[in-house]
Amino acid sequence: MNPFQLLQPETLEEALSLLNTDDPSVRPVAGGTALMLMMKSKVFTPHTLVSLQRLKPSLSGIRLDDAGDLHLGPLASLRDVERSPVVAEFTPVITQAMQTLSNVRVRNVATVGGHLAHGDPHMDLPPILMALDARVRISGQAGEREVALPEFLTGYYTTVLNPSELITDVVVPALPNGLSGTYLKYTALSADDWPMCGVAAFVRMQGGVVAEARVAVSAATERPVRLTGVESFLRGRRPAAEAFEEAAELAAAGVHPLADIRGSSGYKREIVKVCVRRALEQALAARTRNGGVAHE
Ligand SMILES: Cc1cc2nc3c(=O)[nH]c(=O)nc-3n(C[C@H](O)[C@H](O)[C@H](O)COP(=O)(O)OP(=O)(O)OC[C@H]3O[C@@H](n4cnc5c(N)ncnc54)[C@H](O)[C@@H]3O)c2cc1C
């Protein structure tokens, strides 16, 4: 690795002032799990890294607010999220997804903020947060803004973040009563590999029909996406096998998978179809189990 300078601000204001520069080789670093890989392969050669570690006491909390919204501090590690009783009570789908994310060494170090800011479409948490209507709070010299996840993740490894901005909170709105869900991922190379397809599905039933469906797909797509066409197709329908099959066909027709070492575009489209159908079935079945996560 090339030598670089490591700055360790004590406050958010100090960190923001250090990032407020025109030099593109100045970058914040949280857990460093993604950045270090890029630096070792020389994809990214920073002049200066601004470590966020000393902001941990103020930016790693996991809590519910008075409205019942869940807040995930950007410096909470993925292991903190996995072990949080607050998260488990809010939805076990997040807890269980964390348990199969890579390995415990990565989860101990990787942070929520780095996970989202990296913009890698193969991450496990973004499709779940997207299906849960999460918003990202961002701070910069000009002030604060809040962005919904579909607008935050703009493309393949890209987000709306300016180089001088930091994620300061992730807010998941309180869930409506009766919403049950699942996260299902398919790994093509090994059990603990990055997902080749991830599907988060949530359903809420009323009077024997689907009152609300939420479906987000990641990894097979260039960025996580909400399948709004599938969601409206399911609304008002009885949750019969044919409806889920048709919804899965719609999902596959609506995505544009990128070919890579984990599979061709056509193969990934088939996997999306299978995963969406199974995720919907499992989300429905999870009503009696209060949430769930599946791994293929
Ligand atoms: C071997 C390995 C296997 C993995 N497998 C999986 C997997 O199966 N599933 C999965 O989901 N993930 C997987 N990951 C990815 C892991 O989840 C991410 O690398 C991690 O979440 C990134 O977090 P970090 O804190 O280490 O980010 P860093 O590496 O510190 O930073 C990543 C990016 O985010 C920016 N950044 C960090 N914090 C902030 C902030 N608060 N505001 C603004 N920008 C910020 C940095 O500048 C950088 O651009 C794997 C990683 C490794 C190394």
Image (tube, rainbow, N blue to C red):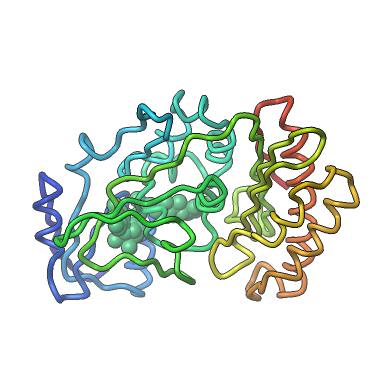
Q: Is residue 240 left or right of residue 49?
A: right
Which residue lies at the image location 9% right of the left edge and 52% below the top edge? 14
Q: Position of residue 251 (x, y in %)?
A: 73, 63
Q: Position of residue 292 (x, y in %)?
A: 66, 34
Q: Is residue 101 above or below residue 224?
A: above
Which residue lies at the image location 19% right of the left edge and 61% below the top edge? 49
Task: Indicate which quadrant contains ligand 1.
Answer: bottom left
Q: Quadrant of residue 211?
A: top right
Which residue lies at the image location 44% right of the left edge and 63% below the top edge? 151
Q: Is residue 275 left or right of residue 4?
A: right
Q: Is residue 285 left or right of residue 172?
A: right
Q: Nearer the viewer, residue 243 or 285?
A: 243
Which residue lies at the image location 36% right of the left edge and 32% below the top edge? 62
Q: Nearer the viewer, residue 237 or 282?
A: 237
Counting the numbered discs, the total is 0
Q: Position of residue 272 (x, y in %)?
A: 73, 61
Quadrant containing the N terminus is bottom left
Q: Nearer the viewer, residue 276 or 8?
A: 276
Q: Is residue 265 above or below residue 29?
A: below
Q: Position of residue 103 (x, y in %)?
A: 51, 43
Q: Is residue 60 above or below residue 258?
A: above
